[in-house]
Amino acid sequence: MAKVLYVETNFVIGIAKGQDPEADALLASEPLPVRLVVPSLCFIESYSAWNQEQKQRRKFIDDHLAYQTREVKRDQISLRAKSLLAHLEQAQIEGDALINDIKLRLRNTLDLLSIKAEMIALEREIVRDSLAEALIGDSTDNLILWSILRHARESPGRVKAFLSNNHLDFGLPQVRLALDRVGVRYFRRTEAALGWLRSIEDLG
């Protein structure tokens, strides 16, 4: 029986930031144990989300760490000031390196996803569905949801699950009901989603 796992932006960001080792292992596996499906909109949103976070991280390094470094440098006597200065300077170096690491992992994750996953194109009908019924207050997430709902309706005969740790939006009762109606089971954790899909295979 064909198995589908829908993923969205948080799947990408979770891997890029090292927050979801199970998702990382899933995407790296050969062959994939399930068919990954992702709305094409999530590629754009992933870049947008990371750009926003990168600005915040950059601001913290440039404004806070750099400011504290300048202040500590003014103390010409304290040995603790010299020690703290070394730590602050190292923190700036490590902060810059971490930003670059995440940026590289993001690019690699999107590259792998573009090769291994089926992409749901943003079509006119999906846009109109999302405008007609806002199941989620956030417009972008609502558009992602309707992309998945339409694809799921057009994919009968498959076991379907949706993975997103954004439970504040995708875990809403009306959203879960809409997913249930098209045969999609919602999960917040990669391990739980894969476990459920494997149990269906075992039952088959």
Image: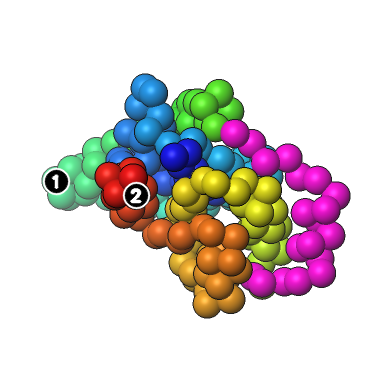
Residue located beneath label 1 in the image:
79
Q: For numbered disc 2, what is the local secondary structure?
A: helix
Q: x, y (%) of residue 3?
A: 46, 42
Q: Quadrant of residue 202?
A: top left
* Front residue of 93 and 13: 13
Q: Which residue sits at x=55%, y=46%?
A: 157
Q: What's the distance in space between the residues labelled 2 and 1, CA to CA?
A: 63 Å
Q: Which mark is residue 65?
A: none
Q: x, y (%) of residue 29?
A: 35, 27
Three-letter residue code for mark 2:
Ile
Q: Which residue sits at x=82%, y=69%?
A: 132
* Front residue of 122 and 1: 1
- Whether residue 137 is visible: yes
Q: x, y (%) of residue 90?
A: 29, 36
Three-letter residue code for mark 1:
Leu
Q: Identify the image quadrant of the N terminus.
A: top left
Residue located beneath label 2 in the image:
200
In this picture, residue 160 sits left or right of residue 93:
right
Q: Decide: is 182 above or below 49.
A: below
Is 10 included in the stretch rendered in magenta?
Answer: no
Q: Identify the image quadrant of the C terminus.
A: top left
Q: Which residues are magenta?
A: 118-136
